[in-house]
């Protein structure tokens, strides 16, 4: 080792924590992949389903981070066996055993401490800070260990969600249930009276689960009214003989009918009209309507502007009849079904409209002020670029109440007024939380999922996208249905139960086991604040900062959260001063946002300022652990620059599975990185040549050690290599000289990428074989498997080894785009620039088509590398044709 790299900074003199020596990514990823999927979150950690928050990190990830970050002194650790009769576990009476579990953690064997994951572990004298608490996950998980937790966020909605999560452990569920019953007795029928319809099977009413609307425009060329249907699907048949059929709307008689195939011509069983349900009157790109009467095609947003908005027409509904459920003559499709609009449905809506017009008192319980222009709401007003731009004004929406119809406003305002009148302040806030979350499905900004027969939610794409066919959900909720207040309340109860007696699920072989309840409730020693991390005045106070900082413009939640904020403030503004403004703070948000004239450079400076205050808040021997969205070398360089510039030294990094929710429409985040860093006093000068040699040795040593001891992917190994290399660099940040000049962090990271790839002989063909060997491969897998190799996702894309034109597809031998790519090169240069994979897939294709292959085999002079690749392809696909075309004359010489 060079003399320069032997010089130690203060962080090297500190005793390393387990998380700096190893992390059980295999076990965490096994859990994370299950916890992240859809409604599974309700069963793993229901506390986090009480209210929506964006890009919420998984509880199992932050529990493991806390476990590996907080345990350092065995004498301050107690381990209890979960269960009603919780008792000290055998570990607790033996500090030597706990010390061994802690001390034995290293890169090759990180699992020893994992043994405590399902235990009720208590840790003394630890203070934790999360200054970007978001949805509160880090605080909840750290509090379960008995740590004193402090959290902050600039956004008041984040503050409110985290506050209620941390209060679950001290909340009496009986009191919440009493308040709900009080509210229900006043409001449930008051709301449900506007969501009923004549039952098709008797002289009584059924409950309406949701109504179906369509937006309409007047044709600019004739007197026709154009209903904006992209197609005429309504839902799927669910039960009995109708299961698998499609319910569609007949454009002639406007009735709902069942068809076998919605993409084919069909005949309406009600009126005899022949039509194709897949053909609506909107052009394929969705920007123009096509008038069925005169044939005029015209821009939809132009027509909206000229006609001062849309008209909307009620076309049908989904119902459930409690009275019919025990009728033996009816099947489930009759009890819970779909029906086109009847006059009584239209009259009921008009009744609600008229009442709302005269309810002046209730209007104070709806947000009727203008929507603040921003990137998500008025992107065309600003210069610059960022994902997910929106423009509500071209859809005729300028104020928050215009996202709802009059019936929704009437019912929601009554519900909110009822909540405001509750005397129990704790219950009032918890029920407000449920009300706020239910707003995701109780707005005309949602549509109906015709494939899954369920109401969608407003933030499916993390943007404001007004649909042309809105679905109006029953805001209180019917006996069936989702995304309403009643369902939100059920999730709230589960969250409070969890907070009082949390549990965990953990892998036991291939099985996931649910633990008995822990004795330690959530949030016993917790404090949160609303504010900017750059304004806090903590100094030398916290043992650890565990957080998830913002990342460029991935999710501009300061704009999206206003949807909840404008409703929450109606109840909270007199109690909390930061709910007084009409909109939440945005200018101060650390995010790249063209609407605030904040670019990437501004974001980097603001993040650097945040890290500087975090360092000040930490004790001298404190540690910073945070998750970071996996990205490219330039982003890594910016992060490394921000950390090192303010005096941090990176000590480890690990890859973990990210939340599978997409952060932006059409954009996928493959996985997260856990970054671990320590404050350091000074950096040491070093020449680039010396540092390069040390980084190269570190990369090779790390790779060799991990390949020998861990069953993890090449991509995971590459991330951990980078962490070790960054650790070497951060000891010398700002003092690495090359040709007489100081290298920037970005320059060093680029070099580190090259060094890691030099240390790896894994290329495009290897990554592709790994993808073939993966179950249900995706772009996430491409990104992950390329990490730490000589291949990049762009290399695979440019050679058509995958494409995303119609969902993710691998470029297998029978893929048209892949074969076209290969054929072009075969025809163009005789194969001089074909890879071995190109040649083998070409031969496999010709064999399948019954075309001669032997002349190509002879011309290409097959070598050992090509035969080895053929064998690997045969192994992972079970298709031995790859090997046979190279060596069996009977097969290859047609």
Image (tube, helix red, strand yellow):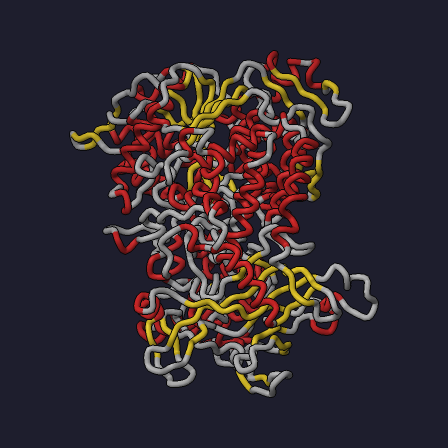
Locate residue 539, reporting x and y percent: 38, 15
Q: Nearer the viewer, residue 285 or 854?
A: 285
| Location of the N terminus (image quadrant) | top left
Locate residue 121, reporting x and y percent: 64, 23
Q: Is residue 118 left or right of residue 728?
A: right
Label count reads 0
Q: Is residue 807 left or right of residue 740?
A: right
Residue 489 vertical position relative to residue 78 in the rendered view, above or below: below
Locate residue 126, reporting x and y percent: 52, 17
Query: Residue lying farthest top?
Result: 75
**Quarter of the view holding residue 573:** top left
**Quarter of the view holding residue 888:** bottom right
The answer, for residue 54, to whether it is visible in the render is no
Query: Residue lying farthest front?
Result: 358
The answer, for residue 472, to whether it is visible in the render is yes
Residue 167 vertical position relative to residue 798 in the rendered view, above or below: above
**Quarter of the view holding residue 764:** bottom left
Q: Residue at x 69, y 62 (%)?
A: 206
Q: Residue at x 26, y 53 (%)?
A: 381
Q: Nearer the viewer, residue 203 or 529?
A: 203
Q: Residue at x 63, y 78 (%)?
A: 260
Query: Residue lying farthest left?
Result: 740
Q: Nearer the viewer, residue 783 or 404?
A: 404
Q: Nearer the viewer, residue 604 or 538?
A: 538
Locate residue 871, reporting x and y percent: 54, 60
């Amino acid at each position: 080792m060079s003399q320069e790299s032997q010089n130690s900074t203060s962080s090297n003199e500190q005793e390393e924590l387990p998380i700096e020596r190893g992390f059980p990514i295999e076990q965490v990823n096994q859990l994370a992949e299950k916890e992240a999927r859809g409604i599974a979150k309700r069963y793993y950690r229901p506390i986090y389903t009480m209210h929506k928050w964006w890009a919420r990190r998984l509880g199992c990830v932050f529990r493991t981070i806390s476990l590996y970050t907080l345990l350092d002194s065995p004498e301050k650790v107690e381990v209890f066996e979960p269960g009603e009769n919780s008792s000290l576990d055998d570990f607790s009476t033996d500090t030597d055993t706990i010390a061994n579990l802690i001390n034995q953690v290293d890169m090759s064997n990180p699992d020893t401490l994992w043994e405590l994951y399902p235990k009720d572990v208590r840790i003394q004298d630890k203070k934790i800070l999360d200054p970007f608490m978001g949805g509160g996950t880090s605080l909840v998980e750290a509090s379960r260990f008995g740590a004193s937790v402090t959290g902050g966020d600039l956004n008041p909605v984040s503050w409110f969600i985290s506050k209620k999560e941390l209060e679950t452990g001290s909340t009496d569920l009986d009191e919440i249930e009493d308040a709900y019953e009080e509210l229900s007795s006043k409001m449930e029928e008051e709301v449900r009276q506007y969501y009923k319809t004549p039952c098709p099977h008797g002289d009584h009413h059924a409950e309406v689960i949701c109504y179906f609307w369509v937006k309409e425009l007047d044709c600019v060329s004739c007197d026709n009214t154009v209903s904006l249907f992209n197609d005429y699907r309504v839902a799927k048949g669910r039960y009995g003989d109708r299961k698998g059929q499609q319910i569609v709307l007949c454009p002639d008689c406007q009735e709902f009918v069942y068809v076998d195939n919605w993409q084919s011509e069909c005949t309406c069983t009600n009126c005899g009209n022949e039509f194709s349900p897949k053909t609506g009157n909107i052009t394929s790109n969705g920007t123009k309507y096509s008038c069925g009467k005169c044939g005029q095609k015209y821009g939809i947003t132009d027509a909206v502007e000229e006609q001062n908005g849309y008209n909307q027409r009620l076309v049908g509904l989904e119902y459930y009849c409690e009275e019919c459920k025990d009728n033996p003559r009816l099947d489930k499709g009759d009890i819970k079904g779909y029906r086109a609009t009847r006059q009584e449905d239209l009259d009921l809506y008009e009744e609600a409209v008229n009442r709302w017009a005269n309810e002046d008192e209730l209007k104070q319980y709806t947000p009727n002020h203008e929507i603040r222009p921003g990137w998500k709401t008025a992107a065309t007003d600003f210069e610059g670029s960022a994902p997910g731009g929106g423009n509500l004004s071209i859809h005729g929406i300028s104020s928050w109440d215009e996202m709802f119809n009059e019936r929704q406003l009437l019912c929601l305002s009554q519900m909110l007024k009822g909540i405001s009148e509750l005397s129990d302040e704790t219950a009032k806030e918890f029920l407000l939380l449920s009300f706020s979350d239910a707003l995701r499905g109780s707005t005309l900004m949602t549509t109906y999922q015709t494939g899954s027969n369920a109401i969608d939610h407003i933030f499916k794409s993390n943007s404001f996208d007004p649909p042309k066919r809105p679905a109006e959900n029953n805001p209180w909720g019917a006996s069936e249905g989702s995304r309403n207040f009643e369902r939100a309340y059920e999730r709230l109860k589960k969250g409070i139960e969890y907070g009082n007696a949390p549990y965990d699920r953990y892998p036991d072989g291939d099985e996931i086991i649910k633990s008995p309840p822990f004795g330690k409730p959530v949030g016993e020693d917790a404090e949160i604040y609303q504010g900017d991390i750059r304004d806090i005045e903590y100094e030398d106070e916290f043992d650890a900062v565990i957080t998830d900082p913002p990342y460029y413009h991935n999710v501009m939640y300061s704009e999206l959260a206003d949807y909840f904020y404008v409703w929450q403030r109606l109840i909270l503004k007199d109690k909390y001063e930061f709910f007084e403004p009409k909109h939440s703070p945005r200018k101060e948000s650390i995010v790249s946002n063209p609407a605030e004239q904040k670019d990437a450079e501004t974001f980097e400076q603001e993040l650097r300022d945040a890290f500087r205050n975090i360092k000040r808040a930490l004790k001298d021997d404190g540690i910073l652990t945070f998750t970071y969205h996996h990205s490219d070398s330039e982003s890594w360089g910016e992060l490394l620059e921000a950390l090192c510039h303010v005096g941090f030294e990176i000590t480890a990094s690990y890859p973990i599975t990210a939340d599978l929710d997409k952060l932006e429409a059409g954009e996928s985040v493959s996985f997260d990185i856990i970054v671990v860093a320590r404050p350091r006093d000074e950096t040491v000068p070093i020449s680039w040549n010396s540092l390069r040699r040390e980084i190269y040795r570190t990369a090779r040593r790390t790779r060799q050690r991990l390949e020998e001891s861990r069953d993890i992917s090449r991509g995971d190994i590459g991330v951990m290599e980078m962490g070790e290399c960054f650790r070497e660099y951060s000891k010398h940040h700002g003092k690495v000289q090359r040709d007489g000049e100081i290298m920037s962090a970005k320059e060093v990271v680029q070099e580190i990428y090259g060094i890691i790839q030099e240390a790896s002989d894994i290329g495009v063909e290897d990554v592709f074989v790994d993808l073939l060997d993966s179950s249900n491969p995706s772009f996430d897998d491409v990104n992950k498997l390329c990490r730490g190799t000589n291949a990049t996702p762009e290399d695979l894309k440019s050679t058509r080894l995958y494409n995303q034109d119609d969902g993710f597809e691998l470029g297998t031998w029978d893929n048209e785009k892949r074969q076209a790519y290969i054929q072009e090169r075969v025809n163009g240069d005789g194969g001089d620039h074909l890879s071995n994979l190109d040649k083998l897939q070409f031969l496999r294709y010709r064999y399948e088509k019954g075309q001669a292959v032997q002349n190509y085999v002879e011309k290409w002079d097959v070598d050992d590398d090509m035969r080895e690749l053929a064998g690997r392809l045969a192994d992972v696909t079970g298709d031995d044709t790859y090997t046979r075309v190279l060596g069996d004359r009977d097969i290859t010489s047609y």
